[in-house]
Image (tube, rainbow, N blue to C red):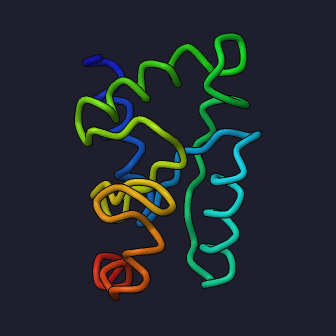
């Protein structure tokens, strides 16, 4: 998992908002739609089409394991704001929608 940790830490430092997604995930699509509607620029990193073996990249599986170890959540989308994990669309620490509702997302962004 060390290689995945290094890769994720490097990736999340390249943009204010980084979103890890699956191509076939409706939650990933909805997350991107919310950010697009808000006019928030983000970097999308796809881990493959879905979590099923053969549809996820090899590094994607390792990154999911790292997310689980670091945050307790391996599901996608997984959103980082200025290097801090906020989780997924509805759940996490606290998740995109709860963070928007509370104002935390914009505070982290600025």
In the image, what residue occupies the spot 53% across and 25% down? 60
Position of the N terminus, as image quadrant, is: top left
The foreground one among 109 and 34 is: 34
The foreground one among 56 and 74 is: 74
Position of the C terminus, as image quadrant, is: bottom left
Q: Is residue 97 left or right of residue 21?
A: left
The foreground one among 10 and 44 is: 44
Specify the quadrant of the image occupied by residue 100: bottom left
Residue 50: horizontal and vertical position, in percent? 68, 29
Residue 84: horizontal and vertical position, in percent? 27, 58
Q: Is residue 109 left or right of residue 96?
A: left
Q: How many marks?
A: 0
Is 85 situated above or below 31? Answer: above
In the image, what residue occupies the spot 72% across and 51% down? 26
Q: Is residue 72 left or right of residue 50?
A: left
Is 40 situated above or below 77? Answer: below
Residue 71: horizontal and vertical position, in percent? 26, 42
Specify the quadrant of the image occupied by residue 51: top right
Q: Is residue 107 left or right of residue 87?
A: left
In the image, what residue occupies the spot 35% across and 52% down? 13
Is 62 situated above or below 94? Answer: above
Specify the quadrant of the image occupied by residue 65: top left
In the image, what residue occupies the spot 32% across and 32% down? 68
């Amino acid at each position: 998992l060390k290689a995945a940790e290094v890769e994720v830490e490097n990736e999340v430092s390249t943009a204010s908002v980084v979103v890890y997604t699956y191509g076939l995930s409706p939650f990933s699509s909805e997350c991107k739609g919310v950010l697009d509607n808000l006019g928030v620029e983000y970097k999308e990193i796809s881990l493959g089409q879905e979590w099923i073996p053969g549809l996820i990249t090899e590094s994607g599986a390792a990154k999911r394991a790292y997310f689980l170890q670091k945050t307790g959540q391996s599901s996608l989308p997984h959103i980082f704001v200025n290097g801090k994990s906020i989780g997924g669309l509805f759940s996490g620490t606290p998740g995109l929608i709860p963070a928007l509702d509370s104002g935390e997302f914009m505070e982290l962004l600025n």
